[in-house]
Image (spheres, helix red, strand yellow):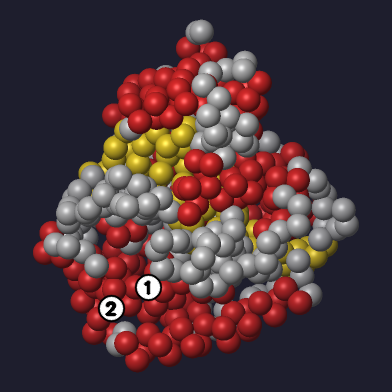
């Protein structure tokens, strides 16, 4: 197989790869070796992986080829990268910290479901310490880089996962989102990133992450692949807190079916009050072009300003308290980075346990107020990031408040919907003058990922992006 043919296979996507494995056209071991070779060749330039599991992945692939469970699954033989905040049996979950971490006793429920569907974990991806920032750089793992331009960040906190998928080192990767950590890397790297409704994907055996702000998901190159992964990963487990009614049908079917009737789409580029950010000219152009395309597709588009209120302040307080509590779980907090220690201290001082409880009690009222927009509209369109990807180090090494300010100016449109728990998806929207991906965000009603997938699939069909590949991916 020529290098060009190998590249095409690497970018074929999980739907097609699993079909070939199920049919016997392609062996799972052959597929794993292809990606291991790409990781060995390309990842030294990116630093996407904390650990590569070559022997373990090849053993799992051999079992698939021998007809073991998973051979007939929707992800049969498909290598998948695991983010370093998802419990993975037998492997340490370091959360990007130098603090010692013990091997996990069981798989997280989403990972268990991925393996049951035939997916093969091939490695564990880099994250910033405790998943705190929208870049992926830290004392423990160094700097992870964007395959579109290694001088830029792939985003965070799922930055290693995004870099790996964008560069074709894996077809798909696990991710999580507590304030944009799926959508930010998707936007930086030209990927599709769905933050599911709170409770759609189980966090078992973990409690709800970041005081209920965070949820597990995946990063992919296409809308259909994202829908396929959510079909596999979603569902409650015993002991879960908030849960969502099961979907009748499939998310993949929704992604492959354009909206039957025109949707009522609200749009707003207004920065939520309390956030300090300015939308770049390139990102404004991407937003306006997407808006025009939605109108050309027959949808009703109306400018509506969401009633954000003080949601930005509510988010930052919840975030700071969550940092304080996550920091307290470290075995060696003295080994944490300076910014982590500073944020944890600020969270402990400013957000007391009583204040924490009041914030959680207020959350439903905040969500109800913001979600009134969806009484008259089906989807909200907002910009994605304020600009294309920033420098690879982001605010790494800066004092906590300076790093926090840089983060807020970069991604102001995402955190509100971690408070409300609504589904939100980041989509590619062309390229900036610097050659880096642009993005938009679609937000739906709670529990209505299928509406977002249907509309996103229609946008992708009208404006295909999957053939766009970063320079490093074709070396």
Q: Is residue 357 visible?
A: yes
Q: How far apart are the two marked residues, 2 and 1, measured between alpha carbons? A: 8 Å
Q: Residue furthest left?
A: 334
Q: Secondary structure at mark 2?
A: helix
Residue 357 picture quarter = bottom left
Q: Residue furthest right?
A: 261
Q: Is residue 13 visible?
A: no
What residue is disc 1 on?
A: 319
From the viewer's side, name the closer residue of 170 and 457.
Answer: 170
Tag 1 or tag 2, which sits nearer the N-term? Answer: 1
Give the vertical position of 32 relative to 179 (above or below).
Answer: above
Please state the horizontal and vertical placement of residue 330, each as a whole percent of the image: 21, 64
Tell me the quarter of the image containing the C terminus: top left
From the viewer's side, name the closer residue of 409 and 341.
Answer: 341
The local crowd at label 1, few if under 14, some if 14 to 19, many if 20 or more residues have their Cα within 10 Å, is: many
Q: Residue at x 48, y 54 (%)?
A: 109
Side of 241 where 249 appears, left or right: right
Name the mark on residue 288. none
Q: Residue at x 38, y 79 (%)?
A: 317
Q: Residue furthest top?
A: 1
Give the vertical position of 143 relative to 356 (above or below).
Answer: above
Please state the horizontal and vertical placement of residue 355, each as a whole percent of the image: 36, 89
Give the vertical position of 104 relative to 191 (above or below).
Answer: below
The local crowd at label 2, few if under 14, some if 14 to 19, many if 20 or more residues have their Cα within 10 Å, is: many
Residue 38 picture quarter = top left
Q: Residue at x 41, y 74 (%)?
A: 211
What residue is disc 2 on?
A: 347
Give the vertical position of 396 relative to 253 (above or below).
Answer: below
Please state the horizontal and vertical placement of residue 10, each as a whole percent of the image: 52, 24
Give the total of numbered labels: 2
Q: Are marks 2 and 1 in contact (CB under 8 Å)?
A: yes
Q: Secondary structure at mark 1?
A: helix
């Amino acid at each position: 197989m020529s290098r060009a043919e190998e590249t095409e296979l690497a970018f074929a996507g999980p739907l097609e790869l699993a079909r070939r494995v199920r049919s016997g056209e392609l062996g799972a071991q052959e597929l794993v070796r292809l990606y291991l070779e790409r990781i060995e060749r390309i990842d030294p330039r990116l630093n996407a992986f904390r650990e590569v599991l070559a022997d373990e992945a090849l053993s799992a692939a051999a079992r698939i080829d021998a007809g073991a469970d998973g051979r007939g699954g929707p992800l049969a033989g498909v290598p998948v990268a695991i983010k370093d905040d998802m419990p993975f049996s037998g492997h340490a979950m370091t959360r990007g910290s130098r603090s010692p971490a013990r091997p996990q006793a069981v798989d997280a429920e989403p990972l268990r479901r991925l393996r049951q569907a035939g997916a093969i974990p091939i490695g564990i991806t880099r994250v910033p310490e405790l998943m705190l920032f929208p870049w992926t750089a830290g004392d423990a793992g160094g700097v992870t880089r964007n395959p579109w331009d290694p001088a830029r960040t792939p985003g965070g906190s799922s930055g290693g996962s995004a870099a790996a998928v964008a560069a074709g080192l894996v077809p798909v990767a696990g991710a999580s989102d507590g304030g944009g950590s799926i959508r930010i890397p998707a936007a930086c790297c030209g990927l599709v990133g769905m933050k599911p409704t709170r409770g759609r994907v189980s966090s078992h055996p973990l409690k709800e992450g970041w005081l209920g702000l965070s949820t597990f998901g995946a990063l992919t190159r296409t809308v259909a692949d994202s829908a396929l992964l959510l079909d596999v990963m979603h569902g409650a487990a015993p002991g879960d807190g908030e849960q969502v009614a099961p979907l009748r049908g499939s998310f993949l079917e929704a992604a492959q079916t354009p909206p039957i009737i025109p949707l009522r789409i609200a749009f707003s580029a207004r920065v939520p009050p309390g956030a300090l950010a300015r939308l770049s000219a390139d990102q404004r152009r991407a937003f306006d072009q997407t808006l025009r395309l939605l109108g050309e597709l027959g949808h009703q588009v109306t400018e509506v300003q969401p009633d954000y209120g003080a949601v930005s302040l509510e988010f930052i307080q919840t975030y700071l308290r969550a940092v304080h509590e996550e920091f307290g779980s470290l075995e060696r907090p003295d080994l944490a980075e300076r910014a982590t220690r500073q944020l944890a201290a600020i969270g402990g001082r400013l957000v007391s346990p009583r204040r924490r409880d009041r914030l959680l009690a207020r959350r439903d009222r905040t969500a109800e107020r913001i979600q009134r927009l969806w009484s008259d509209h089906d989807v909200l369109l907002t910009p994605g990031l304020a600009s294309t990807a920033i420098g690879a180090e982001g605010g790494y090494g800066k004092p906590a408040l300076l790093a926090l300010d840089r983060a807020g100016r970069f991604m102001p449109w995402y955190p509100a919907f971690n408070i409300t728990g609504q589904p939100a998806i980041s989509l590619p929207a062309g390229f900036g003058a610097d050659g880096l991906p642009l993005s938009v965000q679609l937000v739906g009603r709670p529990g209505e990922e299928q509406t977002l997938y249907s509309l996103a699939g229609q946008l992708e069909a009208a404006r295909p992006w999957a053939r766009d590949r970063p320079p490093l991916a074709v070396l």
